[in-house]
Image (tube, rainbow, N blue to C red):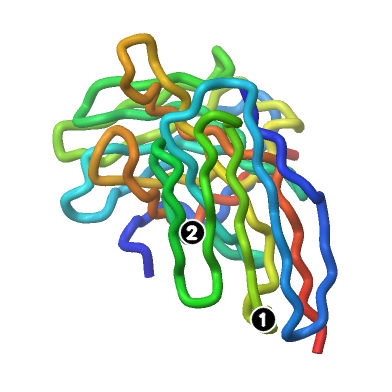
C-alpha cells in the first residue's frame, strides 16, 4: 500500500460528459502528479502541483484541469469527454517538488462510451 | 522530451541477467526507475542524481552517466518476481541548475522471466 488514495476506482461515462477524479497524497507529501496511461502505453505526464501551486505542466488538454487544495488533496477534472480519453489515470505523490521518489495510487479506470 | 528506452521487450530464463537502457536528448538532473506489474500501479525502484552515481537494490542496480545523459538498469540472476514493465523517468535541468520537476517517463521495457 503506497498510502496514496484515488477515487473512484472505476468510472464509466458517456461522450460529452464531465468527471472529477480525486487523489489524496501520502501523509507528509507536498507534491502531487497526474499521469494518463492508455492501453499498453507508457505514462503520459499531465500536471504537477507542489504545496497548492502548479509546478509543471505536460501535455494536458485544455478540456482537462486540475487543482491542489489547502489540505493537499488534488482533483483532476475532465470535460467534454471523448472516446480517446478512456485510460487509466494515476496520481502520484512525493515529499519534495523534485528528486523525490514518486508513490503511485492504484489509479482510476475511466471508460468513455 | 520523452527519454528513449531499449530494448522494448526482453525474455529471460530465471537466473539470467538483463540490462535496460534509458537515454535522453536533454541535460538530466536525475533519473528514476520504476517497475509496473500487469494491472498494478508503478512501484519505485531507485533514483539516481547527477554526478554519475551507481546504486544497488538487492540484485538490481543502476548507473547514471550525466555526460552522456544515459542511465542503465542492471538485473542480475533474475527471478520470476522481476517480470513486469520497467520505466525510466527523467527530470531535466532547468535554466538555474534546478530540476524542471516534471518527471517524464519512457515508453517502458517489458521484461518476462520464465522458469
Marks 1/2: CA–CA distance:
29 Å
The residue closer to the viewer here, A21 or A51, is A51
Q: Write down the chain letter for disc 1.
A: B
Q: Write down the chain letter for disc 2.
A: A
Q: Mark 1 falls on what kind of element?
A: loop
Q: Mark 2 falls on what kind of element?
A: loop
**Residue at 34%, 56% in the rendered image:** A4
**Residue at 68%, 79% in the rendered image:** B78
Q: Is residue B84 above or below residue A82?
A: below
Residue B31 horizontal/vertical position (percent): 49, 41
In the image, B113: left or right of A25?
A: right
Instruction: Sort mark 2 into few (<14), some (14-19) or many (20+) by Cα contacts within 10 Å.
Output: many
Could you tell me which quadrant the C terminus of chain A lies in? top right
**Residue at 31%, 62% in the rendered image:** A3
Could you tell me which quadrant the N terminus of chain A lies in? bottom left
Residue A44 figure quarter: top right
* Residue at which label 2 appears: A106
In the image, A51: left or right of A63?
A: left
Looking at the rendered structure, which numbered label has been put on residue B105?
A: none
Residue B71 horizontal/vertical position (percent): 58, 44
**Residue furthest out toward the bottom:** B115
The residue closer to the viewer here, A79 or B50, is B50
Is residue A11 among what the camera can see? yes
* Residue at which label 1 appears: B77
Residue B62 horizontal/vertical position (percent): 53, 56
Amino acid at each position: 500500500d503506497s498510502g496514496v488514495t484515488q477515487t473512484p476506482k472505476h468510472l464509466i461515462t458517456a461522450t460529452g460528459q464531465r468527471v472529477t477524479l480525486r487523489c489524496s497524497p501520502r501523509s507528509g507529501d507536498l507534491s502531487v502528479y497526474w499521469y494518463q496511461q492508455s492501453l499498453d502505453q507508457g505514462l503520459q505526464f499531465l500536471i504537477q502541483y507542489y504545496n497548492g501551486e502548479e509546478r509543471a505542466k505536460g501535455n494536458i488538454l485544455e478540456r482537462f484541469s486540475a487543482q491542489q487544495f489547502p489540505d493537499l488533496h488534488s482533483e483532476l477534472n475532465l470535460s467534454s469527454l471523448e472516446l480517446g480519453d478512456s485510460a487509466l489515470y494515476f496520481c502520484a505523490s512525493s515529499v519534495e517538488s523534485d528528486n523525490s521518489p514518486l508513490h503511485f495510487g492504484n489509479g482510476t479506470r475511466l471508460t468513455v462510451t | 522530451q520523452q527519454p528513449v528506452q531499449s530494448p522494448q521487450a526482453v525474455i529471460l530464463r530465471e537466473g539470467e541477467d538483463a540490462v535496460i537502457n534509458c537515454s535522453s536528448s536533454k541535460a538530466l538532473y536525475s533519473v528514476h526507475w520504476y517497475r509496473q506489474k500487469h494491472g498494478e500501479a508503478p512501484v519505485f525502484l531507485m533514483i539516481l542524481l547527477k554526478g554519475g552515481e551507481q546504486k544497488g537494490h538487492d540484485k538490481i542496480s543502476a548507473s547514471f552517466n550525466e555526460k552522456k545523459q544515459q542511465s542503465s538498469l542492471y538485473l542480475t540472476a533474475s527471478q520470476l518476481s522481476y517480470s513486469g514493465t520497467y520505466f525510466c523517468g527523467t527530470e531535466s535541468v532547468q535554466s538555474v541548475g534546478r530540476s524542471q520537476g516534471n518527471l517524464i517517463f519512457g515508453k517502458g521495457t517489458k521484461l518476462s522471466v520464465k522458469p
